[in-house]
Amino acid sequence: MLALLRRFLISSWLVVVLLLFWWKVSANSESYFWPPLSQIASQFKTNWLFANVADDVLPSLKNLAVGYFIGAPLALFVGAHLGLSEIAQKIFSPLVNFFRSIPGVALVPIFIMLFGIGDQSRRVSIAVAVFFPTLIATIEAVRTSDAVLLDVSRSFRFSSFQSLWRVRVPSGAPMISSGLQVSLQVGFIVMIVSEMLGAFRGLGAFTVEAQQSFMIIDMWTGIIMLGILGYIFNVIFELIEKRALRWYRGQKGLTS
Amino acid sequence: MTHPMRTGARLELKDVTKTYTGHGADKHVLDHISCIVEPGEFLSIVGPSGVGKTTLLRLLTGLTPVTSGEILLDGKKVTSPPEDLAIVLQEYTRSLMPWLTVEKNIELPLKLKKIAKDERGERVQSAIIEVGLEGNGSRYPWQLSGGMQQRVAIARALASRPRILVMDEPFASVDAQTRLDLEDLVLKVRDDFGITTLLVTHDMDEAVYLADRVLVLTGKPAHVAAEIAVPLVYPRDQVETRAHPDFGHLRGEIYQLIRGKR
């Protein structure tokens, strides 16, 4: 319990100090663009605890969830098979490298054009953007499986399908997991940007609308909300990863 | 404890030659290797390092194709890893699945062979007992010492009920004391199940201590320098057997073969 408290203090004192600093420095601010943190905080309470959550946060998160849980598993499946075949890699790698070089957010206008400005185009944009980081990590993870482990699998007569899903993918899980994490971050960015371009609701839309109508305090609350959400997602991801990859940390002798 | 007695498999190498091609000059590794291993026999394969012992092992386990000649297991040509064969490799840290517990490691090959759950459980437990790992089933390989990890690898091999067990330098990476224990474990396993056992090693003492017969490979490309029968009685004993005059004699003979023809 005490150790937990200590860990919390170590990892949070800097945030607290910076917030206090911001609070203090902005307290008497008359700048239109840098309102006092106290005002932002009280507006934050009005906006997000929890008045607009159902209208502006949940739909965004739903889009992210739908896009992520379509794009990432698909990338895992396709990447695992591409990783197996050298020929397939040669054929597809120029294509993959081309598309991965395009920032996910740049695809948003195309999908708005194709699917309109509804949630559908946002979900597709997220799914596509999420696809590539996981795809590339999975290809690499599957391609670089340990030769000894593969010999053992062959000696036990595992089929190539069995050794893919029972040996190559699990042994590459740490690398695949990094890809999934990058995908989540990219998905989050695309979620916001897709709402900044022509959406009526959602956190991105809220923030950009506030900015355009000079409601600077509202804009700040939107930005802070985004930061908090992004942070929470990362923490949740890492908690799950830590559990799922306990073996990897144990094997590497990592304690925390 | 009692075990259902199984008969070992008969392995026959006929004029086996291996040449690696590609990447510049061809590399002729093995030259007309012939040998018969009788059911239940324990054969050690020794030779200087780099002679091609591991290549030979890869050929006879079906992991690598022969260039010419034939390998027959119970009269059937080996072209891919055969059903009745199990292997144990030197690199225990790399040959076990670190994401699975000891039990799951042993169980995985059985599961993928679609063996019924009850039988899997029985086989896993009896393999764990056979190698002396009681109480460690739910630990992970990386929580175990090197010797214990190699026991897991042996248990995994046994659980698939092989008729021939092939080991590549299985004790090369464990400490001396553990090594002696594992040697005796392997002899016990051969005794309990009557399986044909092949051991590739660079350690001449170990080769003699364990085997009915020692196959000595030398030269580049490697050929069979000698097949030496080991007349020492079983059960063997780490102290008595090694102190026996015949032991020293055989060891010296093998040493000269390897040194002399290098």
Image: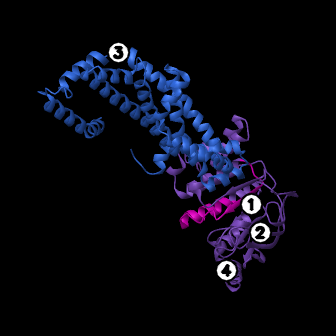
Chain colours: A blue, B purple
Label 4 and label 3: CA atoms lie apart by 87 Å
For the point 73% across and 68% down, which residue is it?
B20
Disc with the residue nearer the chain's start (4 vs 2)? 2
Between disc 4 and disc 2, the foreground one is 2
Do discs 4 and 2 share a chain?
A: yes
Q: Are marks 2 and 1 in contact (CB under 8 Å)?
A: yes
Tag 3: amino acid: Asn
Q: Name the residue under label 3.
A: A52
Q: Mark 3 lies on which chain?
A: A
Is residue B174 within the magenta segment? yes
Give residue B107's position: percent from left, percent from top. Answer: 65, 43
Residue A182 visible in image = yes
Task: State the mark number for residue B248.
Answer: 4
Secondary structure beneath disc 2?
Answer: strand
Label 4 and label 2: CA atoms lie apart by 33 Å
Tag 2: amino acid: Lys
Task: Name the residue at the bottom extreme.
Answer: B260
Q: In which quarter of the image is residue B88?
A: bottom right
Tag 4: amino acid: Gly
Which span is picked out in magenta? B160-187
For the point 67% across and 72% down, which residue is it?
B241
Number of other residues with Cα within 10 Å of mark 3, as a class: few under 14, some 14 to 19, many 20 or more: some
Secondary structure beneath disc 3?
Answer: loop
Disc with the residue nearer the chain's start (4 vs 1)? 1
Q: Name the residue under label 2.
A: B18
Q: Mark 1 points at which residue?
A: B64
Is residue B84 within the magenta segment? no
Residue closer to the observer: A157 or B131: A157
